[in-house]
Structure formats: structure tokens, C-alpha cells
């Protein structure tokens, strides 16, 4: 199928409006922007439908976007996109790029409405597997009742029926049916995937991880009725669910573990950081997992989230009739950065070219101090992560020559530059000339350590970003985010081994 040109339509900004999804947007060209969660003008081809989809007779509302290139003679993929709490199907359509992607790549999208007060009937449970913490209470507010049996859950059954409706109405490729959701729609997508994911090739969500008590029982066993499928998890760095940052990192981690375990994923992903987008691409024996953290974005979904999901994952996956997930080339290959280094405070493993490698001693967090006056007052003039020169030499293919007492080191770079370092000196001799580093060279465990920030920036002009005492170095613009920093520390702590899933009940509390 020939792809259409991607074109953005201009809209009328409503910068003074901060009402939540005002009805005047519907059918208009009004656009609203809030911290990157940008709306598009109401799509011209978006159509509303009302019908009782299930046997209980309730009238459901949904919206369909059929691209102008649709050919009834050709099998066409389907995406079902679930809105966030207090939103609508049309709201999900304008706050995402699904219709833009559908027009460009030739698939159909359905945007259903929740059946009760714009709120999905989803399971809640406990964030953590520890019932003693007050902040671990169930979600507050007036929420629809969630039936214990998903067969009695109208919203879940409506989603099933809507898929069947679309299959009867259009020439849907049954091997390429997908679901995606934002916030409460993410919870809805997760619930559907865990119960009916066997009819999907892939599922994606952003903004709201699933409560851990819904994923694991007290023995750490997986709770799942549908089996494996390709999973995409977008976790905005400043997401406030759960509201505590440490709890959020913890819950996000175990949501990742859940699908890693179910899909048979390798322990070590390929990592790629492109601007604010922090990707971890996991390969699985049964299905794959993509974990994305977006730097400096809060709860919600970015306008390009759908574009990333489609181009990196959904464009290259299908589910065969026997349940096997088959991968072909996606529009954008899921590959890690060709050159990347990551180190973290107090860890003696490092990330190098998409592998976990040992260092001879741990990375050390060091403060450069400035002393003032006769009273000896001091100011911190810089904080740096110092790593062994033996590791930096390995990373850059340099010749490493320590002195007999290891208090001095000579490093010869591949381009011929000769560097000399000495314990306690902030100086570095470069081709018989003297330069100051960010901080003095340190000596630990028979190793000379220097600031990785200085080494990579000054000597190679590389991009260096820091978050939560983790340093990430690449040859292009990248900004390390909190969830990715946590993921990297997880990898370095385990030496690149799989998590001990048997200890989930213990460590998930």
C-alpha cells in the first residue's frame, strides 16, 4: 500500500481555555496545548456511531476513522484506542496522532466511549503488594462498579463486541488487531490484554501503570488468562500515578517485569535515547516489549505517542491463527544506540554498546570543593561521576598503561593523542600540553578514576546527560530520564541477569 504524505492541519489556538475537554472543541478547529499534550483540529473523517453492541441492550457510542486510502478488497489493520478518565472517544482522537497515522499508513481506528460518566469500569487493587501502607489505598473518588467476573463487565464486553462489529463492517486483517489506551484507558487496555489479549497482536498504554496486586498473587505468580502479546509501555517521567516518585518507579518496574516474564524476554534490552524519548527494546521468545520514558513530560500522552507506537512496533507485528506472534521489519527498526556508555554511582558494572560489562572498581560520586577564608568554609563547585581509566580506555579502544604503583596512567587514544594522569591532580597532560579537568583524579582499589563527563565531552565532544546519579553518553543529542535511569541501575545491579522472579512477593512490597 502506498503511504500518504503526512500533513498537519492548522487549528485555532485556545490559549485562554483550561477547561477539561470543553464540548465546543467537538467538530471545530480549536487546538489546545498543555505541556506537550497537544490536540489537533477535529478530524474531518471522524464519524460518530451509536448502537447497542452487547446483549444487555445498553447504547454504546464510538467513533471511527477510516482513511481515504481504504480499499474493501484489501485486509486492513485495526487499532482500538481507549480514552483517559473523564474524556471521550472523540477526545482521544484529537489528543493523539492515531488519525494522522491512520491516514498516512492506511489502517482503521475505533475510539469507544466509556459507558458510565466518561469513566471505564476497570479493576483497581493495590499499587504495591503491601496492604499495610496508608498511601497504598485503592483509587479514590466515585467510580463505576467493577464486576468480579470480566464477562459481566460491560466496557470489556463492549470492546470485544466493537472489534467484532468492525470485522463485520470492514475488511479487517484479523492478524493485525491492536489496542492502545491513555491513563485510565491504559488500565482498561491492560485489563483487556490480560483477559482477551489472545485476539490482539499488540497492546500499548501511556500514563498509568497497572496496580501490582492485579498482576501477581501473593506467591509471585502471574495473573493472566490470555497469554503473551507484544506490549508497549509509555511512562512519562513526571507522571503522578502513583503520586510518590519512588512508588512510581517501583510500580513501573514491576509492570515491566510482568510482561518480561510472560513474554519470555531477555534480561538485557537494546537502549536508545533520542532527544527526550528514552527507549528500551526487549526481545522475547514469545513476544516483545518496548518500554518508553519521556523526559520532562507529565501524566498523559504526547501527540507523537501513536506515531512512535505504530512505527516502532505495530507496523511490524502480527498474530497468526495458532497464537504465534510474528515480527517483520517495523517502519523504524528497534535498535539501540550504536555507541553508548552508562555508569551509575556505586556500581562496578557499566553499560557499553548495549551490553553490561564489569569495571575494575565502582563508579564514585565526587564533589569538587572550593574553600574560602581563614575559617575554612567550603562551597561545592561541581559534582561528578568518576570511573576507572581502564574502563574508559576499553570503551574508546585506547591503549592503557598504568604506572607500576598505579598512581599514574598514560592513555593513548586511537587518533594518536597521548594523555597522562596522576593521583590527586586536576591536570591532564595532552600531547605535552596541560589542561584542567572538572575535578582531580582519584585512586581507589589500585585504579585511577577521572570524571566521565570531562573525558567524554572534552576529548570527544560527546553528548552527556545525568539523571538520578546515572550518566548516559552518546554521539547524538539525548536526555536521560528518571525511569530509564532506574532501569539502567536495575541492569547494573543484576550484572545483566534476569530479575529473580521468585522474589517478587518479597521485593514488590
Image: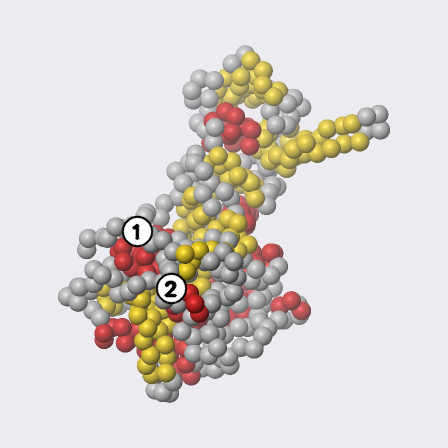
Q: Residue at x 29, y 56 (%)?
A: 315
Dot 2 lies on which element? loop
The N terminus lies in which quarter of the figure?
bottom left
Q: Tell me the distance, in whole angstroms, between the alpha carbons under discs 2 and 1.
A: 18 Å
Q: What residue is disc 2 on?
A: 28
The C terminus lies in which quarter of the figure?
bottom right
* In the depicted structure, whether residue 433 falls above or below residue 113: above
Q: In screen coordinates, is 154 left or right of 67?
A: right
Q: Earlier in the sequence, mark 2 or mark 1?
A: 1
Q: Residue at x 20, y 60 (%)?
A: 69
Q: Residue furthest left?
A: 73
Q: In screen coordinates, is 263 left or right of 487?
A: left
Residue 383 place in picture, x, y as percent: 64, 35
* Residue 7 marker: 1
* In the depicted structure, whether residue 1 falls above or below residue 456: below
Q: Residue at x 22, y 61 (%)?
A: 68
* Residue 362 marker: none
Amino acid at each position: 500500500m502506498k503511504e500518504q504524505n503526512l500533513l498537519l492541519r492548522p487549528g485555532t489556538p485556545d490559549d485562554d481555555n483550561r477547561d477539561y475537554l470543553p464540548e465546543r472543541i467537538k467538530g471545530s478547529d480549536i487546538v489546545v496545548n498543555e505541556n506537550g499534550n497537544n490536540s489537533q483540529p477535529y478530524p474531518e473523517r471522524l464519524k460518530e456511531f451509536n448502537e447497542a453492541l452487547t446483549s444487555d441492550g445498553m447504547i454504546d457510542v464510538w467513533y471511527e476513522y477510516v482513511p481515504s486510502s481504504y480499499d474493501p478488497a484489501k485486509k486492513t489493520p485495526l487499532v482500538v484506542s481507549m480514552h483517559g478518565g473523564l474524556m471521550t472517544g472523540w477526545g482521544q482522537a484529537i489528543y493523539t496522532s492515531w488519525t494522522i497515522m491512520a491516514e498516512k499508513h492506511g489502517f482503521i481506528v475505533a475510539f469507544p466511549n466509556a459507558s458510565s460518566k466518561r469513566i471505564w469500569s476497570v479493576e483497581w487493587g493495590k499499587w504495591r503488594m503491601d496492604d499495610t501502607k496508608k498511601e497504598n489505598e485503592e483509587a479514590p473518588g466515585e467510580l463505576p462498579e467493577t464486576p468480579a467476573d470480566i464477562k459481566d463487565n460491560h466496557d470489556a464486553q463492549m470492546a470485544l463486541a466493537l472489534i467484532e462489529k468492525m470485522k463485520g463492517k470492514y475488511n479487517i486483517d484479523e492478524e493485525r488487531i491492536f489496542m492502545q489506551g491513555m491513563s485510565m484507558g491504559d488500565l482498561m487496555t491492560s485489563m483487556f490484554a490480560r483477559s482477551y489479549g489472545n485476539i490482539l497482536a499488540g497492546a500499548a498504554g501511556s500514563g498509568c501503570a497497572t496496580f501490582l496486586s492485579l498482576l501477581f498473587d501473593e506467591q509471585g505468580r502471574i495473573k493472566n488468562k490470555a497469554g503473551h502479546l507484544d506490549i508497549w509501555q509509555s511512562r512519562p517521567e513526571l507522571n503522578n500515578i502513583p503520586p510518590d516518585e519512588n512508588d512510581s518507579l517501583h510500580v513501573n518496574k514491576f509492570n515491566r517485569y510482568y510482561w518480561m516474564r510472560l513474554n519470555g524476554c531477555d534480561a538485557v534490552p537494546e537502549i536508545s535515547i533520542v532527544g527526550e524519548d528514552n527507549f528500551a527494546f526487549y526481545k522475547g521468545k514469545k513476544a516483545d516489549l518496548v518500554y518508553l520514558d519521556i523526559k520532562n513530560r507529565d501524566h498523559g500522552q504526547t501527540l507523537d505517542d501513536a506515531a512512535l507506537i505504530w512505527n516502532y512496533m505495530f507496523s511490524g507485528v502480527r498474530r497468526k491463527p495458532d497464537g504465534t506472534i510474528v515480527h517483520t521489519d517495523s517502519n523504524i527498526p528497534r535498535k539501540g544506540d550504536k555507541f553508548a556508555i552508562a555508569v551509575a554511582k556505586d556500581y562496578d558494572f557499566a553499560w557499553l554498546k548495549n551490553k553490561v560489562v564489569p569495571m575494575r572498581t565502582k563508579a564514585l560520586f565526587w564533589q569538587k570543593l572550593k574553600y574560602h577564608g581563614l575559617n575554612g568554609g567550603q562551597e561545592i563547585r561541581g559534582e561528578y561521576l568518576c570511573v576507572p581509566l581502564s574502563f574508559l580506555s576499553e570503551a574508546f579502544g585506547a591503549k592503557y598503561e598504568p604506572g607500576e604503583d598505579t598512581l599514574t596512567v598514560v592513555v593513548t587514544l586511537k587518533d594518536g593523542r597521548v594523555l597522562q594522569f596522576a593521583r590527586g591532580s586536576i591536570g591532564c597532560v595532552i600531547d605535552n600540553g596541560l589542561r584542567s579537568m572538572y575535578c582531580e583524579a582519584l585512586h581507589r582499589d589500585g585504579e585511577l578514576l577521572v570524571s566521565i563527563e570531562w573525558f567524554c565531552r572534552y576529548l570527544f565532544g560527546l553528548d552527556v546527560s545525568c539523571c538520578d546519579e546515572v550518566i548516559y553518553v552518546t554521539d547524538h543529542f539525548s536526555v536521560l530520564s528518571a525511569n530509564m535511569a532506574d532501569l539502567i541501575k536495575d541492569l547494573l545491579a543484576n550484572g545483566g541477569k534476569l530479575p529473580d522472579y521468585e522474589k517478587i512477593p518479597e521485593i514488590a512490597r
